[in-house]
Amino acid sequence: MSSRPERAPTIYDVAQAAGVSKSLVSLVLRGSPSVSEARRTAVLEAMARLDYRPSQAASALAGATTRTIGVLIDDYRNLWFVELLRGLQEGLAEHGFRIAVADHTLNAHVEASPLDGFLSMRVDGLVIATEPSPAMRVPEGLPVVVAGHRQGVVPGADVVANDDRLGARRATEHLMDLGHRSIGHLTGGGGAARLRAEGFAEAMSAAGLAPRTVPGDGATTEEDGYVAAARLLDEAPGTTAVFAANDTMAMGALAAARERGLRVPQDLSVIGYDDSPIASTHLLELTTVDSRNARIGAVAAERLMARIGGPGDPPGRRLLSPELVVRGSAAPPRPGP
Amino acid sequence: MSSRPERAPTIYDVAQAAGVSKSLVSLVLRGSPSVSEARRTAVLEAMARLDYRPSQAASALAGATTRTIGVLIDDYRNLWFVELLRGLQEGLAEHGFRIAVADHTLNAHVEASPLDGFLSMRVDGLVIATEPSPAMRVPEGLPVVVAGHRQGVVPGADVVANDDRLGARRATEHLMDLGHRSIGHLTGGGGAARLRAEGFAEAMSAAGLAPRTVPGDGATTEEDGYVAAARLLDEAPGTTAVFAANDTMAMGALAAARERGLRVPQDLSVIGYDDSPIASTHLLELTTVDSRNARIGAVAAERLMARIGGPGDPPGRRLLSPELVVRGSAAPPRPGP
DNA sequence: GCCCGCTTTTGGAGCGCTCCAACGAAGCGT
DNA sequence: ACGCTTCGTTGGAGCGCTCCAAAAGCGGGC
């Protein structure tokens, strides 16, 4: 009977079981190439037999590195980070790095600074997937990538994002190509929304059209999209197309349109931004702009690895080209009366 | 000029700066009550001045506990875990515990077992918010709560979930109270879906109605809801109400209804399950069942804390009562022809 | 003025690993 | 046969904390 809780096995236990020294076990653990095949298998076999699991705490404390990258996301509900995480994960896995995720909104009241937890953990790098705030002070020398946002308040950080202005221009041009002239834009809070609004205005002005931009209640939720679209459609009833700052707001716009008896896309075209999971549903079939989040994650991983390997090049800014995803929510306007 | 990277300060540095011993600093760190006010402030002041951050690795290695609970979720896209996390977080914070989240689908190809990372971290407890699998072997004595799922494969684990069968019964009864007789159920894969289907069948049978249950493509996505609803509406055109296994499937059902020219709720009533963020949007206004996920998180926290304090009571199963949330997607059927 | 019991503070050992310098055993040339 | 290198392996020191037993301070009662 195993009465006492039985302390977890350590490398010493493994070493003894395999008939080697603890140092050899440590070498196997870290995948050193200079271990003979015979001993390696003996050690691995002993580990499996003892159900050994290395202590992350011990290796972090003893080693120079934790092989962990902290990822700060804004809110789990904003699903754009899912693809980012996937790209990041894949890019890091081949280097043996893992990811630790923290949610800004959940931890807001727990910690003084949102990054404290990561710094206590001694992460080897940081991905900030939120609008950076001045409170995010980072120790000098720690590699940091700001992902998806372009307001680089974090000094020394790389920035990887999609070109919001270009994406907005493409969406707007798509609507114009379809024949729309009365196009409204639903905007929200935050830097990305501002850039998208600028791209919209540029495209409209370039075509000699007056850009009409309407805010919601300051954020970028479905509610904001609903409110903004309601305002737009009531103020400018001749509007035939709407470009929303993101897919969630576009969803709100669909609700406002339906409420007014406007069919999408026959009476009103709607375009979103982000190509989030909701955009591809049967219910929305939303034409949108793919902000390339998986790619952003992959590039962020690349940057971090380069910077961890050596000082690397000076911090830079990398903008990826977004792509229009045509689905069913935008069509030519009906011939005017 | 700070040329060298400047090793992070340790308790020794803080101790020296505050003119006390390292042990006293450690006591302050752990909030010991037996430290004089004068020294405590001196230490805290020194910490702030040096920008000191405790090393999680060191305290985990030296101490008996990590004050960390691992939470395994299935997929970041299934948003039901957000509220769970919030409830859990709040319940744990008052005990000074933190959360580490891992995503099953992302890590699937990285680690042998999804729990390996947590065990390497030496978490003090585990919340499994996925359908438990036999591969999830857990060391004896580690407190585990299975949250939101009732197929308790994990030995010795507490189970905290909503009563899916009851919730399904309530949703079905609501439809019957509105006057519906031809009600179909859209089901999917997984244990929760099975229980919800059972609840539906019970309620229907109790009212002397034939329960018609239709699967999608085996999962519970929007696509599955769409496929299942399409089948149902084509096979049984007289159907006036649909109860979907979750909100996402309900969304697919809305799409299938619209495609057939059926208005919701005038021609077809639709009810979902989970009260996920999409249910409360203007576009859906979905009547649904609140599965009380924040409460589930809070109860899970309570259970873990009790079990970490002492062996506590034997593992149990706690079912919370779900609540119907009435919105706009269900109404009385039109008078029959 | 001294001893006792309490509270507050302290040094030392040790957690499980990594890193490093150094070791023995082959292999090689001369 | 000898030293020299190379490869595989080893013990020891130390990472930054926590925990423990014991020391120091501090009154109060006799």
Image (spheres, coloured by chain):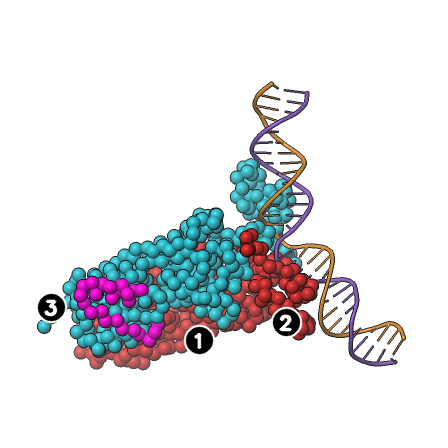
Chain colours: A red, B cyan, C purple, D orange
Q: Position of residue B73 (x, y in %)?
A: 43, 63
Mark 3–mark 2 distance (CA, rounded to whole Å): 75 Å
Please check whether the numbered discs 3 and 1 fall on a single chain. no
How many discs appear? 3
Q: Nearer the viewer, residue B292 or A50?
A: A50
Tell me which amino acid carries mark 2.
Answer: Thr
**Which residue reaches farthest left?**
B337
Q: Is residue B201 magenta?
A: yes
Q: Position of residue A117 (x, y in %)?
A: 51, 55
Q: Earlier in the sequence, mark 2 or mark 1?
A: 2
Question: Label 3: chain?
Answer: B
What residue would you read off at disc 3?
B335
Residue D16 vertical placement versus B180 (above, below):
above
Q: Is label 2 in a helix, a strand or a loop?
A: helix
Q: Position of residue C12 (x, y in %)?
A: 69, 45
Q: Is label 3 in a helix, a strand or a loop?
A: loop
Residue drawn at (63%, 42%), measured in percent from left and top?
A: B21
Tell me which amino acid carries mark 3.
Answer: Pro
**Of the residues tagged 3 and 1, which is closer to the observer?**
3
Image disc number at residue A19: none
Residue drawn at (57%, 43%), measured in percent from left and top?
A: B27
Labels 3 & 2 near each other (Cβ < 8 A): no
Residue drawn at (20%, 75%), measured in percent from left and top?
A: B236
What residue would you read off at disc 1?
A321
What residue would you read off at disc 2?
A41
Mark 3–mark 1 distance (CA, rounded to whole Å): 55 Å
Q: Residue B189 appears in which quarter of the rendering?
A: bottom left
Span highlighted in magenta in the image: B195-219
Labels 2 & 1 near each other (Cβ < 8 A): no
